[in-house]
Image (cartoon, grey):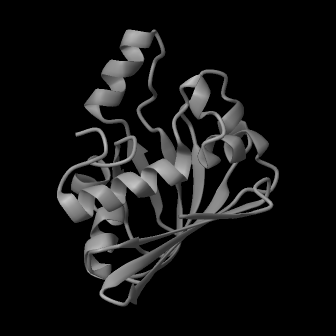
């Protein structure tokens, strides 16, 4: 499912999902969907170029953080819409704000691109995350820190999205 080119600067992930491009687009861009897969969180987009967006933590994320003694900020990811071409392409700047030390946020904004294409009765979703100068975030989103409890990054998120759209259930259900 994944293809990685120099993971320190650019990561590319591709998955085929038995769903329409519109369904995949909606899952990526509508807060009632973004909170249902991956690590959760409601993402509010204004899909105009230059518009800011933010992801707020889910209730489950806030509860888990409290149980572990880690406060969860009101905004966990933020950025700006660079380009939106529904249901084909979404390009964003992307910054992770959810870490105890602030080191991830200090790495600044990266560039995230979703490419959505019809493909033989399915939809091909390609995620390109450009991460120059962001080695901590690069390790996190690649899933390299999974063993330490940081999650499986984009491979896990995309697998969870695929499961949700194809079966109506996430991997954890």
Name the residue rendered at 79%, 53% in the picture: 8
Q: Please, is residue 3 above or below residue 170 in the view?
A: below
The answer to whether one can see residue 149 in this image is: yes
Q: In which quarter of the image is the C terminus?
A: top left
Residue 44 point in image, percent of width and height: 34, 55
**Residue appearing at x 44%, y 25% in the figure:** 72
Reply above or below: 43 against 144.
below
Query: Which residue is pictured at 27% across the width and 79% down the height?
Result: 22
Work out whether 84 lies above or below 96: below
The mark total stands at 0
| Image point (44%, 11%), residue name | 68
Task: State left or right for residue 149 relative to residue 88.
Answer: right
Q: In this view, does 28 lie to the left or right of 8?
A: left
User: Picture quarter containing residue 148?
Assistant: top right
Task: Left or right? Give the position of 115 relative to 22.
Answer: right
Residue 170 screen position, x and y as percent:
27, 48
Q: In which quarter of the image is residue 85?
A: bottom left
The furthest residue to the left: 168
Taking 169 as reference, is 151 left or right? right
What percent of the width, then of the height, locates residue 159?
A: 41, 55
Q: Is residue 44 visible?
A: no
Above/below status of 106 relative to 54: above
């Amino acid at each position: 499912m994944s293809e990685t080119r120099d993971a320190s600067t650019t990561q590319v992930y591709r998955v085929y999902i038995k769903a329409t491009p519109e369904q995949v687009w909606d899952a990526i861009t509508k807060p009632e969907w973004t909170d249902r897969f991956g690590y959760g969180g409601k993402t509010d987009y204004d899909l105009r170029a230059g518009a800011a967006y933010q992801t707020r933590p889910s209730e489950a994320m806030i509860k888990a953080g409290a149980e572990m003694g880690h406060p969860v900020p009101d905004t966990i990811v933020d950025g700006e819409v660079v380009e939106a071409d529904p249901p084909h392409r979404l390009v964003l700047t992307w910054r992770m704000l959810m870490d105890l030390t602030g080191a991830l946020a200090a790495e600044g904004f990266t560039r995230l691109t979703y490419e959505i294409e019809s493909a033989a009765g399915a939809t091909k979703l390609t995620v390109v995350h450009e991460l120059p100068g962001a080695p901590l975030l690069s390790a996190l989103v690649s899933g390299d820190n999974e063993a330490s409890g940081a999650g499986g990054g984009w491979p896990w998120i995309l697998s969870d999205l695929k499961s949700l759209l194809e079966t109506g259930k996430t991997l954890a259900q």
